[in-house]
Amino acid sequence: MEITQEEKTELIQRALEARQYAYAPYSHYAVGAALLTESGEIFHGVNVENASYPLSMCAERNAVFKSISFGHKKFKAIVVATENGGSPCGACRQVLSEFGLHTLVLTVNGEGIPTLETTVAGLLPDAFSPQDLLTE
């Protein structure tokens, strides 16, 4: 999905700002995300770690779940900010795919420099989707 350069710039800034609130005392890998809905709302997310690692939550899923809790289920883009410009994990890719394979995904490093621009479909080809659960 296409977004304007102005929208990209704002999302990058918001993801970088969110990143400072990440709770990552174990990995020290702070992640911030900014999710743009089709209606123009922006929702942030940060990673939140837990001493019991499987209970941790990624920034991307945090942003998606927050958006959904406010009634927004259609997304235009998500920006993910990490120190090294890392890409979303498999779980985040799967959750994003639930709400649209054409959502733009942009990753940036700690200075806000883009490291990847693709779509959810580009990150997760042949994704398992709600259609796979339908039976005739």
Image: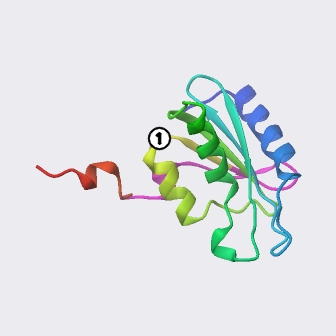
**Left/right of residue 53 with respect to residue 132 in the rendered view:** right
**Left/right of residue 13 with respect to residue 99 in the rendered view:** right
121 in the magenta segment? yes
Residue drawn at the location 78% of the way across and 32% of the way down: 10
Residue drawn at the location 78% of the way across and 44% of the way down: 15
In which quadrant of the rendered view does residue 82 lie? bottom right
Residue at mark 1? 102
Q: Which residues are magenta?
A: 107-126
Q: Is residue 49 above or below residue 66?
A: below
In which quadrant of the rendered view does residue 125 lie? bottom left
Type of amino acid under label 1: His
Observer able to see residue 93? yes
Percent of width and height locating residue 13: 83, 39
Outermost residue, top direction? 39
In which quadrant of the rendered view does residue 35 lie? top right
Observer able to see residue 116? no
Percent of width and height locating residue 126: 36, 59
Percent of width and height locating residue 95: 50, 53
Q: Secondary structure at mark 1?
A: loop
